[in-house]
């Protein structure tokens, strides 16, 4: 179909496409798809874990994953210790005594120094802070939590630590109360 009209001495053409009712239904009923695939290169030299699923990948490859709109692919290098706050916690001082989750991604030895201060002032510049070392021995499957170094006013004297060894299919989870003294935990 062609429609002509004149405006300012020029001819304009408008194209219309005609569809039969069955063609129109087919277009309306066609499933709408959105490709939510993300491509990520995982560097060689280590294995990598999908942060959300715990799935393990060999490094040196490109991984394509379908991701819902509310999920961004994050990969953690094997041999990492990742501290987490409890789900739903909005800010650090909301629940100062909240447990810490420590996620261990096996596959290599790892160390991490956990640092705490009052989260509100510059008192840490005067040494008002506390630290303790976390050491993962992959061959022995042990986590050593070192003695707390330092202190600060309002410090939580005894904190719950939820240690999660991220193993695809079945995480090993241990919960301990840490009061500043060294601890060693054995995992299967």
Image (tube, rainbow, N blue to C red):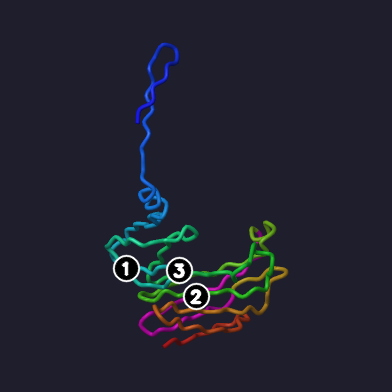
Q: Residue 150: where, in percent of width, then height?
A: 63, 71
**Which residue is found at the position 32% from the left and 62% from the top?**
63
Q: Is residue 167 left or right of residue 176?
A: left
Name the residue beneath numbered marker 2: 134
> What's the distance in space between the residues labelled 1 and 3, CA to CA?
19 Å
The magenta-colored residue range is 126-148
Say whether residue 150 is magenta: no
Dividing the picture into quadrants, the one containing residue 66 is bottom left
**Which residue is found at the position 36% from the left and 43% from the top?**
19
Give the residue at the far top of this rendering. Answer: 9
Depth-wise, is mark 1 or mark 2 nearer the camera? 1
User: Label 2: how many residues lie within 10 Å, few (<14), some (14-19) or many (20+)?
Assistant: many
Q: Label 1: state its secondary structure.
A: loop
Q: Residue 170: where, in percent of width, then height?
A: 43, 82
Q: Which badge, 2 or 3, comes first in the chain's sequence?
A: 3
> What's the distance in space between the residues labelled 1 and 2, CA to CA?
20 Å
Of residues 3 and 126, the one drawn nearer to the viewer in this rendering: 3
Q: Which badge, 1 or 3, comes first in the chain's sequence?
A: 1
Viewport quadrant of the C terminus: bottom left
Q: Label 2: state its secondary structure.
A: strand
Badge count: 3
Picture disc at residue 52: 3
> What's the distance in space between the residues labelled 2 and 3, CA to CA?
23 Å
Name the residue beneath numbered marker 1: 46
Of residues 13 and 113, the one drawn nearer to the viewer in this rendering: 13
Q: Which badge, 1 or 2, comes first in the chain's sequence?
A: 1
Q: Is residue 144 left or right of residue 153?
A: left
Q: Are marks 2 and 3 in contact (CB under 8 Å)?
A: no
**Which residue is found at the position 39% from the left and 14% from the top?**
10
Picture disc at residue 169: none
User: Label 1: how many residues lie within 10 Å, few (<14), some (14-19) or many (20+)?
Assistant: some
């Amino acid at each position: 179909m062609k429609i002509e009209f004149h405006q300012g001495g020029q001819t304009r053409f408008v194209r219309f496409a005609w569809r039969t009712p069955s063609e129109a239904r087919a277009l309306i009923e066609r499933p709408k798809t959105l490709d939510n695939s993300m491509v990520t290169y995982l560097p060689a030299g280590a294995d990598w874990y999908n942060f959300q699923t715990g799935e393990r990948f060999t490094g040196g490859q490109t991984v394509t994953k379908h991701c819902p709109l509310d999920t961004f692919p994050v990969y953690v290098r094997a041999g990492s210790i990742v501290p987490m706050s409890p789900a739903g916690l909005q800010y650090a001082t909301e629940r100062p005594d909240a447990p810490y989750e420590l996620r261990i991604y096996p596959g290599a030895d790892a160390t991490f120094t956990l640092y705490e201060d009052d989260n509100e002032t510059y008192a840490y510049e005067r040494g008002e802070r506390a630290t303790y070392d976390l050491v993962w021995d992959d061959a022995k499957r042990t986590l050593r939590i070192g003695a707390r170094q330092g202190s600060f006013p309002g410090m939580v004297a005894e904190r719950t630590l939820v240690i999660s060894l991220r193993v695809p299919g079945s995480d090993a989870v241990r919960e301990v109360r840490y009061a500043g003294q060294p601890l060693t935990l054995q995992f299967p």
